[in-house]
Image (cartoon, grey):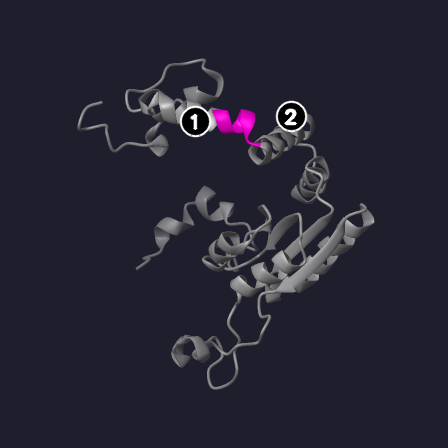
Amino acid sequence: MSKETKNLSCVDCGLINCYRREKSFPQFCLTTNTDNEMIEEAKSLYLNDEFVSKLSHAAAEIEGTYFGKITRVEEIVLFAKRIGAKKIGIATCVGLMSEAKTFAKILNSKGLESYCVICKVSSIDKTEIGIDEKFKIKKGGHESICNPVLQAKLLNKEKTDLNVIVGLCVGHDSIFIKYSEAPVTTLITKDRVLAHNPCRGIIYKRILLYEIA
């Protein structure tokens, strides 16, 4: 690989030959330039690691069977059942409690147990963990932190089999995933400006209009 191409990645590719192998791989392709030992190590996990194998098979079976036919809610229900999950944890944003309640009812109607923990659990004021008062949305009164660490720990205590994120903030979702003992998937990705559909921001390239520090 030349110096000009060594820092290129998949976003620089217009061929996507790795999917169907109907074209050719570009010079900088990660498929052809990744050490074979690393590729085989990953493949071995899909074949021999019980956790990885079970989840990857379930995901592939649902994709292959229902591609473009069912919603993400339905996919999560089917995924949970295919991996043998019985108890589903819901880590929800305070602003999406209505959606979380509806999701819980759907899970219960499909024979799955659910347990929900809201982001404001523990009701700790933001200033108690060193966040300046000026960063509160409504200043001058109590405003609780989002507490993804405790959300995860409470769901761990409940021994959930699969945890589902419902609109946790950017960063808070990262913390929740780090501390969750059960595998995690996402139902809703928060985007307050675009009605929780961040893909629209990419499709219409609105992000290019902003100056982000």
* Residue drawn at point x = 59 percent, y = 32 percent: 50
Q: Position of residue 95 (x, y in %)?
A: 60, 65
Q: CA distance from mark 1 to mark 2?
A: 25 Å
Along the polypeptide, which appears first: circle 1 or circle 2? 1
* Residue drawn at point x = 52 percent, y = 78 percent: 143
Mark number, residue 64: 2
Answer above or below: position of 5 versus 23: below
Q: Which residues are magenta?
A: 44-49
Viewer-closest of 189 and 152: 152
Query: Is label 2 in a helix, a strand or a loop?
Result: helix
* Residue drawn at point x = 56 percent, y = 34 percent: 52
Residue 76's image quarter?
top right
Label 1 sits on residue: 41
- In the rendered structure, the answer to whether residue 75 lies left or right of residue 208 reads right
Q: Position of residue 171 (x, y in %)?
A: 45, 58
Predominant SS of the magenta segment? helix
Which amino acid type is marked by label 1?
A: Glu
Quadrant containing the C terminus in the rendered view: bottom left
Q: State yes or no: residue 58 in magenta.
A: no
Q: Residues within 10 Å of mark 2 (few under 14, many from 20)?
A: few
Answer above or below: position of 165 versus 17: below
Q: Position of residue 40 (x, y in %)?
A: 43, 23
The answer to whether any part of residue 11 appears in the image is: yes
* Residue drawn at point x = 73 percent, y = 55 percent: 114
Mark number, residue 21: none
The answer to whether any part of residue 14 appears in the image is: no
